[in-house]
Amino acid sequence: MVDAIVIGGGITGAGVARDLALRGLSVTLLEKSYPAAGATGRCHGLLHSGARYAVKDPRAAAECAAENRVVKNMAPHCVEDTGGVFLAIDEADAGYGDRLVSGCKAAGVPVEELSVADSPNPAALRCIGTKDAAVDPFLLTLANLYDAYMAGAEIVTGCGVKRIGDGFVETEDGRTIKGEVIINAAGCECAELLQASGRSAPAVQADHGTLLVTERKVCDLVVNRMRMPGDGDIIVPGHTTSIIGTTSEKSASTIPLRTEYHKLVREAVALLPSMKGVRITRAFAGIRPLLGSGDGRSLSRDYKIFEEQGLITIAGGKLTTYRLVAEHASDAVMRMLGENGRCRTMSEALPDVRREEQGEIECRCESAGRRIIEMPFLKNTDTSRYNRLGFGACQGMRCARFSNSPEEFLQERWKGVRPIIDEGQLQQAYVAWASYKTRLGDRWPGDRIVLPRDREPMNY
């Protein structure tokens, strides 16, 4: 019997496990796949300044502004403190800028008017600077899990939960694990898990969002469109690439669509003309767990914590405010247990889980290598994503052989390449095919997939 069982190894579950372990509780975290396998690992890695939410959701904006500073201080090794800008590319955008500044001021979000001549798009009509940054979601999740593990938590990967009972959970492999309090942090699956357990569930809608990865970093700043959040209105730098985001569609599919690719590229070029001609190397899609139901853009990006006797469910939430959500959920756990213990996550730095010396470079285009220290709960997990294999321009052409499972690795990469096949990327795909055909023979995944018909060059 442990004090707390945490279901879900995304950033929220990892944050809860760390918080509770640092308060002295015995904790077991169960993740059905690998850490950051869900929405956490399928986002653009934006560390919000709060500005994107200031007009529509001021409370969320204020929380983002505060947690932005906390994460930067707590985990500087996970953050690229790039700063950001909002650009107006037409008169409507420029008019929205007044609402943006007013909303940010009311929510305590720092912004400043900047000269468009010094912006990434000198043709813009207006430029407002923010404290946006980029964060590595995989590294941040692992740092939280490792700190929880070092504080005594048990981290179990590859262990899905089938049912939540009173004071126990049943795992998919037939085990029963007992806990005084159960924290359901399963993201989009939190409501389904409750329903499968015969419990009432909050309304949580799966919202599909596709993102694009560029061959190189196109801008050193986070670039936002100066308007209400919409499709293709943000470009986030990260490591050696940039990520264009994102769409919003009521769907639980993680398959990016070619129509989304076209739309995102058009919007990105309008926002940042220097994007024209930049090769897109991959598309990927994530599923946001949004509170409520309806059009995804109309739903809040906020979170709620639901409490029952011995059970806490966390619904919604964002990467930027994960620590705050974990603190509030952990406070609820302590109340249920009648325990004392203050939150330490705001003041205690996260450990740097990177190796002091990265070791042999396995992919030059991304400088990918053995960058993560050994962690017992990762032994049976393909650690390629944590070492950033295949995240650079080659998309695995040079480095897939270092993966624990090259065929699965390449198949996953091909899912992201297929929707964005155009002239330049088609050439790259065939080079990759030639490179691995001799190694994998008929097992090479590209041979079994029909290329899109509409791969003519696009004009923007």
Image (cartoon, grey):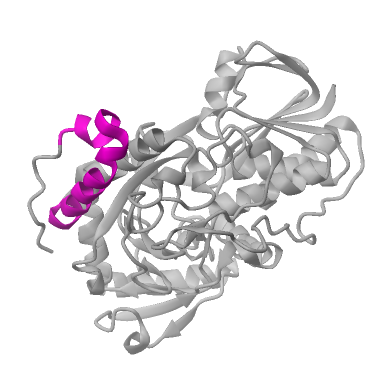
Magenta stretch: dominant SS? Answer: helix
Where on the picture, by quarter, is residue 424?
bottom left
Which percent across, then down, holds residue 356?
Answer: 67, 63
Region in magenta: 422-450
The image quadrant where one finds the C terminus is bottom left
- 135, above or below 456, in the image: below
Q: Is residue 423 magenta?
A: yes
**Residue that appears at 24% across and 61% down:** 279
Answer with left or right where residue 298 lies relative to residue 109: left
Tell which of 78 and 70 is nearer to you. 78
Locate residue 442 relative to residue 72 in the image: left or right: left
Q: Position of residue 240 (x, y in %)?
A: 42, 65
Q: In which quadrant is the N terminus drawn?
A: top right
Q: Where residue 151 sits: x, y (%)?
A: 83, 45
Residue for point 42% across, 69% down: 99
Q: Evaluate whether residue 445 shows in this view.
A: yes
Camera-side residue of 446 and 271: 446
Please indicate whether residue 151 sits to the left or right of residue 76 in the image. right
